[in-house]
């Protein structure tokens, strides 16, 4: 098991040698993931792991991918998507153009979920979906729109619970254990790397989704990222967070109103 001092050394290496700043990530989560890598890759000691990270660019890539969490699914938390469908998206129909930012989009399942929602309420053609993540590997997966066939039954059930009425399988074609989502869903998507720790705002948005990312940050970094989202939201824009996340602790709280029963806030100040 690694010590707090070991974690400090690694975080300092990552920042000084490569510019990756994980210093405000949750320590408990970081230690779990580093210990997991030590066991998985059979390093005889922490010193061996540290040497590998400092000297091997290929291993550094693997290390960063393991530290950045990539767990997602389509229509995750179906009632959340139902609120988007019935409460949020109808308020955007009068806008001539809609910009949505999926921050920390991972492999893109939620971006495709949003594209399906937009398609079904006839808003997809006037919307741009910006999908960003720190990890270029997961972005490449997202860009292809190809996912494993196995979870599709669960995704279809999520879709129905979210208020979907179409045959979910019409949105993809299945082949060799994978599915490929329709190209028309991806036409309005823009994929790009973006580091929530160090990068700035890059546009003004009507809706920002950042779900189950803040839970891996400490409170200071959460506040900084929430301020970034505040700067990036237009008047009356929406911010959507994960089930265990909130901005109620933040100094931004008075400037947002939470939708009843959901982790969605509307900017009012």
Image: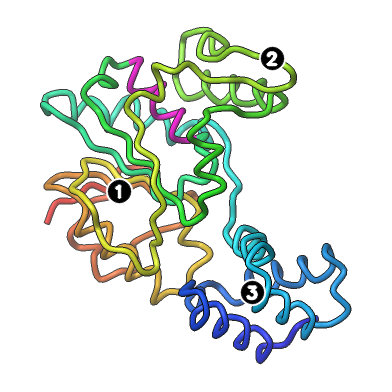
Q: Disc 2 marks which residue?
A: 175
Which is in the foreground here, disc 2 or disc 3?
2
- Residue appearing at x 63%, y 67% in the figure: 57
Counting residues from the N terminus, which is met first, the one under dot 3 or under dot 1?
3
Please indicate whether residue 40 sits to the left or right of residue 204 in the image: right
Q: Disc 1 marks which residue?
A: 239
- Residue appearing at x 56%, y 48% in the figure: 137
Q: Disc 3 marks which residue?
A: 28
Return the x and y of residue 90 as percentages of the image width and height.
22, 25
Q: Mark 2 to mark 3: distance in Å?
A: 40 Å
Magenta: main secondary structure equals helix
Task: Using a 10 Å C-alpha cutoff, classify the residue at mark 2 as few (fewer than 14 neighbours), some (14 to 19) or many (20 or more).
Answer: few
The answer to whether 98 is drawn above or below residue 5 in the figure is above
Q: Magenta segment, which residues?
A: 110-120
**Which of the 4 quarters of the picture holds residue 58?**
bottom right
- Residue appearing at x 25%, y 63% in the figure: 253
Question: Label 2's element?
Answer: strand
- Residue appearing at x 61%, y 58% in the figure: 65
């Amino acid at each position: 098991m690694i010590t707090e001092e070991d974690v400090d050394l690694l975080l300092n290496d990552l920042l000084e040698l490569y510019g990756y700043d994980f210093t405000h990530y949750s320590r408990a989560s970081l230690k779990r993931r580093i210990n997991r890598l030590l066991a998985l890759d059979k390093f005889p000691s922490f010193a061996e792991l540290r040497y590998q990270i400092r000297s091997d660019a290929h291993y550094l890539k693997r290390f960063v991918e393991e530290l950045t969490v990539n767990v997602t699914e389509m229509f995750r938390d179906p009632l959340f998507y139902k609120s988007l469908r019935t409460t949020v998206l109808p308020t955007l129909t009068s806008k001539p153009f809609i910009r949505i930012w999926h921050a920390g989009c991972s492999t893109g399942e939620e971006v495709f979920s949003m594209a399906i929602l937009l398609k079904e309420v006839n808003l997809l053609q006037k919307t741009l979906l910006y999908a960003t993540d720190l990890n270029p590997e997961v972005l490449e997966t997202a860009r292809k729109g190809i996912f494993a066939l196995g979870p599709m039954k669960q995704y279809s059930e999520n879709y129905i619970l979210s208020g979907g009425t179409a045959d979910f399988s019409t949105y993809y074609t299945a082949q060799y254990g994978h599915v490929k989502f329709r190209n028309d869903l991806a036409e309005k998507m823009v994929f790009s790397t973006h580091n929530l720790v160090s990068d700035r705002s890059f546009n003004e948005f009507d809706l920002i989704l950042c779900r189950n990312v803040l839970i891996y940050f400490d409170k200071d970094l959460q506040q900084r990222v929430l301020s970034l989202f505040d700067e990036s939201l237009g008047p009356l824009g929406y911010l959507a967070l994960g089930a265990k996340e909130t901005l109620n602790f933040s100094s931004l709280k008075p400037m947002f109103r939470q939708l009843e029963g959901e982790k969605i806030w509307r900017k009012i100040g």
